[in-house]
Image (cartoon, rainbow, N blue to C red):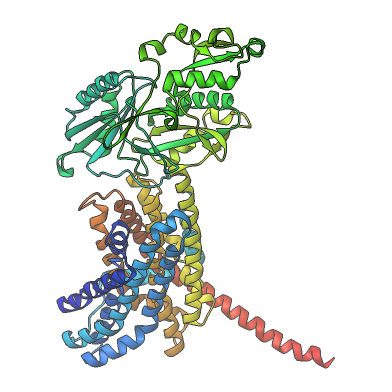
Amino acid sequence: MTRATLVAATALPLSIIPTFAAMNWFDYSLNTITLLSLAAVVGILVDDAIVEVENIDRHLRGGKSVTQAAGDAVTEIGLAVIATTATLVAVFMPTAFMSGIPGIIFKQFGWTAVVSVTVSLLVARVLTPMMAAHFLKPHPGGKQDSAMMGRYLRLVHWCLQRHGTTLAIAAAFFAGSLMLIPLLPTGLIPPQDRGFTRVTVELPPGSAIDATLVTVESARAAISDIPGIKSVFATVGEGLQTTGSSMMAAGEVRRGVLTVNMVDRGERVSQIEIENKMRERLLRVPGARFAIGGGGAPGEKLSVVLTSDSAEALKTTGRALEREMRGIAYLSNVSSTASLERPEISFRPLLQQMAERGVTTALIGETLRIATSGDFDAQLAKLNLEARQVPIRVRLPDAYRTDLNTFNNLRVPGRAGPVPLASVAELSIASGPSQIDRFDRQRFVSVTADLGGAALGMALDAVQALPSMLGRPSHVNFLETGDAELMTELFSGFSIAIVTGILCVLAVLILLFKDFLQPITILSALPLSVGGSLLALLLTGLPLSLPSLIGIVMLMGIVTKNSILLVEYAIVGMRDRGLDMHAALLDSCHKRARPIIMTSVAMIAGMLPLAFGFGADSSFRQPMAITVIGGLMTSTALSLLVVPVAFTYMMRFELWLRRLGSSRDRVLPLQSTR
């Protein structure tokens, strides 16, 4: 048994090493996506080898020589192994052709999986039988079935006798699985534990750098002694920033950033718990907004965007939404661009007086602009130095710019000479937006909040149910942007990939089996995997997110492999050995249950390190592993019982079609003689 294990285990390195060569040819690097793909298929790579070695071992127990057993076993299992690998390729291939941002991300995932699975087939069909013929030894005698096998065969016999009851139980299980979907929160990517985070500090518009320094230092002192925090680095007055249009804009002295580094993962609690503790501490620091996150990583923030042509309606709705979002318990640091207003000088032209003195609005605007911020750069006087020119900007001193009388006494060019500004306009101090943002030529307001580990889909549903969203004016529109837009695109893309994968698997099976009905029998096990996956996510409290969808895609191929092994051997028994349907199914379950359980256990064992979170940050890989393990446990147990029952229904349907066709052949000649 040790020799057989070693022969099967060699398929893993022999499959992965050529995959590295193919990745180099594709110009792929070892990154998060390609490593995730290899981690996902690590259990699959040994499946074909396990099936081959187990079948050779079974022939050896029948008294055959090693060479004869290897030859007979390889010939017997050939179609099943090729079919299982072809279905896996058909499942993973659509993920490489997804559109949009998910397609850009998962192109490398799909191709890496396809190459590794294809290489594993070559290893299982060529190298594994050769190694088995060389290393394995003949068994001195046959091996009796275990008590577990006897109980399983009796249970299969019971299910075949009561096929209606078995099918009803399977249908009820699938219906119950679908009922779990509304109970699961949805999200994009689980919050990551990277060992560092950022705290963005924002003071009101117009704040001086001294006030920012005091606030940032107060925030640093409030969080620096939290257990798990290693160091805090503070910066005030951000430098150049890249805006959404890829333009460079100057930073502001009213902003600051705290970069928080944490100790090693084994010496602290999770990053989410530390960030929530930081939010509690920062509530004590007044006069500023705080946003906590690792630099805009997906899954950390909720962004709600409202657009409208009416600036007043947009401002009112945005402020009402911001106020109501503060009442959602798991959202924190709620902020809105609708409330970012700064003091400004507002003037209302006196048209009659302007006409009498020959003053235009352009002259008034130019006078105020030069007094507050100086002239345009091209029109500034220059101080010529040896190596450069220094522009000389002339404007009112800061002390005078806060006095309205100073602006009233400014002189504006008129027809008969300069006139006081107060004589042609009414000036006042007002407030206005610090900047005007537009989306598709409409003004928009963005309301953001920290999720604090909550699922994005749950938070988005809660926001859309708020009174300000339900009762907003008809000309105020809601847009899904950022993570919400990407999540919608992701679920849509994976839904198409899953449907495409199922159709591709069906097409491959029809070509290989040269039959249409039995491939449907093979696919009957797919619904049985959904319940275990969803139940595992529900029990562990994980959302239905990107890694969970990857796990569901993987399950499609793995579950199909188990069904192929059962159905193919039953067909061989009826066609080549003349067994009736009931005996062929029992013989197939007897011969194929062991390799099915072995491959499922190998897959679960390959996923356990990911499910337990071993290694570096496992927040992305853990939901995928839990999804696969839960689906495998239910699908393996149920497919061993339900697939034989589905086979009987398909065979009876096929016989009915044949009888229908033969009866038509008998009727047609009679009709033609009349």
Figure check: 546 above or below 513? above
Instruction: Classify the position of the C terminus by image quarter.
Output: bottom right
Question: In which quadrant of the rendered view does residue 553 lie?
Answer: bottom left
Figure check: 355 above or below 619? above
Residue 274 in view: yes
Figure check: 361 above or below 673? above
In the displayed structure image, the side of residue 274 where residue 357 appears, left or right: right
Q: Position of residue 670 (x, y in %)?
A: 78, 90
Figure check: 668 above or below 347? below
Q: Position of residue 127 (x, y in %)?
A: 25, 83
Question: In which quadrant of the rendered view does residue 64 lie?
Answer: bottom left
Instruction: Classify the position of the N terminus by image quarter.
Output: bottom left
Q: Position of residue 650 (x, y in %)?
A: 53, 74
Q: Position of residue 247 (x, y in %)?
A: 42, 41
In the foreground, 267 or 341: 341
Residue displayed at 57% across by 38% down: 441
In the foreground, 224 or 658: 224
Residue displayed at 41% across by 13% down: 401
Residue displayed at 59% across by 29% down: 472
Residue 150 in view: no
